[in-house]
Every structure is written in C-alpha cells, then in structure tokens.
Amino acid sequence: MREIENIVVLTGAGISAESGLATFRGQDGLWEGHRVEDVCTPRALARDPALVHAFYDARRAKLAEVEPNAAHYALARLDAQWPGGLLIVTQNVDDLHERAGAKRMLHMHGELKSALCAACGARRAWEEPMGDRPPCPSCEAKALRPDIVFFGEMPYEMERIDAALSRADLFVSIGTSGAVYPAAGFVQTARHYGAWALELNLEPSAGSYLFSETRTGPASKLVPEWVEEVLSR
Ligand code: APR
C-alpha cells in the first residue's frame, strides 16, 4: 500500500443500524413496509404527497430517539486527528455523523432535517413534521419537500466527491450494500486513481470483489478498530 495522505470514507445505512435505525435492504429493511417506488421518487411525491411526507415525517421523528454509536464517534475522532485530507461521504439522511462531531463530511443523498422548495429552490433547516405540503417560507408556494435525493435525481456534491476520490490513497466503505449508484461505483473510481480500498460491512456485499480487502462484522466494532489502526500508522 502506498503512503496514506488522503482518505475518503463512504458510509451507508449499516453504520446507523446499531443506533436503532432500520437499513433499507435485508432483514427488517425499511422497504419491507413500503415499496420504494411508492415513497422515494419525484413521481410518488407528485401523486401522493401525504404518503411521502408521512414516511419522511416518521423517519425524522425517529431521530430524536437515537444516538450516534461507536462507529460514528470513531469517524469523528479520525476527522479531528487525521492530519491529511479526509472526506466522509454519507448516503445516510440521518444526522448521526454530525452529532458525533464529524466536520469534514457531506450528505450525498440529502438530510431529513432539511427542507427544499421545489418551486424556488430555497433550503432551510427543518425539524417539524411536514404534513401535507406546508408553504415555502421564502416564496409561499405549496411546494416544500424533504431535502432528500429521490431515485432518478442527481446526488449532491458529485464534483467534490469525484475530486476527493481522484486524490484518495485509501477508500473505505462502511455499512453499505453497494446496490445504489453512483455511490456503489466509488470504489472503482478510487481504485482507478490508485487508492487501496477497504470494505467494512456486516456481510460481504454485491461489490466485495472490487475491494482490496473486506472485513465482516458490526460497524461498532470494525470501525473503531480500523480508526485506531490508521491513526497509529
Ligand atoms: N454493521 C455494519 N454493516 C451493517 C450492519 C452493522 N451493524 N447492519 C447492517 N449492515 C449492512 C448490511 O449487511 C447491508 O449490506 O449494511 C448494509 C446496508 O445496506 P442498505 O440497506 O442497502 O443501505 P445503503 O447501502 O445505505 O443504501 C443505499 O439506497 O435506498 C437508497 O438512498 C437510499 O442511501 C440509501 C441507498
């Protein structure tokens, strides 16, 4: 492995599972109760805003009941102590990375605690239920929606992510099934530019063969171990 200066970490629903938030796929996955095409698409929002808002309102309310776990805290420690470049890219819409203290991070699939106006594009912090399309505080159009990237929409901050992947010496994927692109392809981009790639997941994922190494187990154990390892290099 070459000298490590720049690290990119990708996280998915698996890192928040031990905090009590359901993952999407696999046993007890959120999608078992809801078909993804009923809740996570622009078309679903246009057809049945009350259903889409109720789904996200319930997920937003759930955030008040959960806490970051040892894996989120370990990444926050890495962020505070790693002297080189670091970017934590999360696919998660929960706020557990930031509540653990991580700063060098971004939400590529949006955030539950943010609202986006589909009419004027304004964004603002949002804690309350949305109910049935409240008016936008900026333009007053009844077009407020969760600031979440739906299937068929462009993930946020792709240019910044691509730039970080092209510079990465180490790419680490944590708690993601590798089922959803473009995030599932980050490992190939990072490796194309020469990064070493490590996967930390409960079980081997669909894309495990793309990684230099896969470690299986719960994130609350694997992530603190790996962070200690990289900080003591
Ligand atoms: N520790 C580590 N990994 C875990 C744990 C745990 N405690 N529990 C579950 N996992 C793993 C599962 O084995 C699975 O491979 O986490 C992965 C979660 O996969 P998904 O549920 O598919 O979640 P994710 O990869 O984040 O989904 C990607 O899909 O629905 C969209 O936009 C949504 O951001 C989401 C995207």
Image (spheres, rainbow, N blue to C red):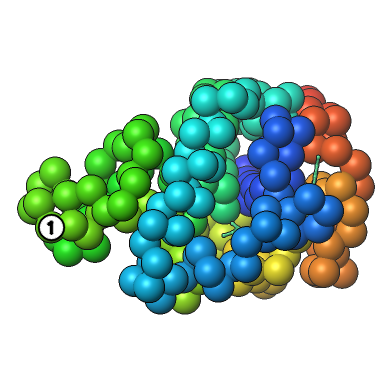
Please tell me whether residue 160 is drawn above or below residue 209 in the rendered image. above
Please tell me whether residue 80 is drawn above or below residue 47 in the rendered image. above
Q: Secondary structure at mark 1?
A: loop
Q: Nearer the viewer, residue 86 or 215?
A: 215
Q: Nearer the viewer, residue 218 or 227?
A: 218
Looking at numbered disc 1 in the image, what kind of residue is underneath it?
Ala
Q: Is residue 110 left or right of residue 178?
A: left
Q: Nearer the viewer, residue 123 or 214?
A: 123
Report the residue at 23% width, 48% height from top: 134
Report the residue at 73% width, 24% height from top: 70
Please tell me whether residue 99 is drawn above or below residue 18 in the rendered image. above
Q: Is residue 75 left or right of residue 142?
A: right
Please tell me whether residue 105 is drawn above or below residue 228 in the rendered image. below
Report the residue at 27% width, 53% height from top: 133
Q: Position of residue 177 (x, y in %)?
A: 75, 60
- Mark 1 neighbour density, 10 Å: few (under 14) some (14–19) many (20 or more): some
Quarter holding the C terminus is top right
State whether residue 32 appears in this view. Answer: yes
Report the residue at 70% width, 30% height from top: 19
Q: Position of residue 135 (x, y in %)?
A: 17, 50
When asked about the image quadrant of residue 86, the answer is top right
Q: Nearer the viewer, residue 49 or 94?
A: 49
Q: Position of residue 81 (x, y in %)?
A: 60, 24
Mark 1 vs ligand 1: CB below 8 Å: no
Q: Which residue is mark 1?
A: 141
When asked about the image quadrant of residue 126, the answer is top left
Q: Position of residue 172 (x, y in %)?
A: 72, 50
Q: Is residue 209 left or right of residue 8?
A: right
State whether residue 195 appears in this view. Answer: no
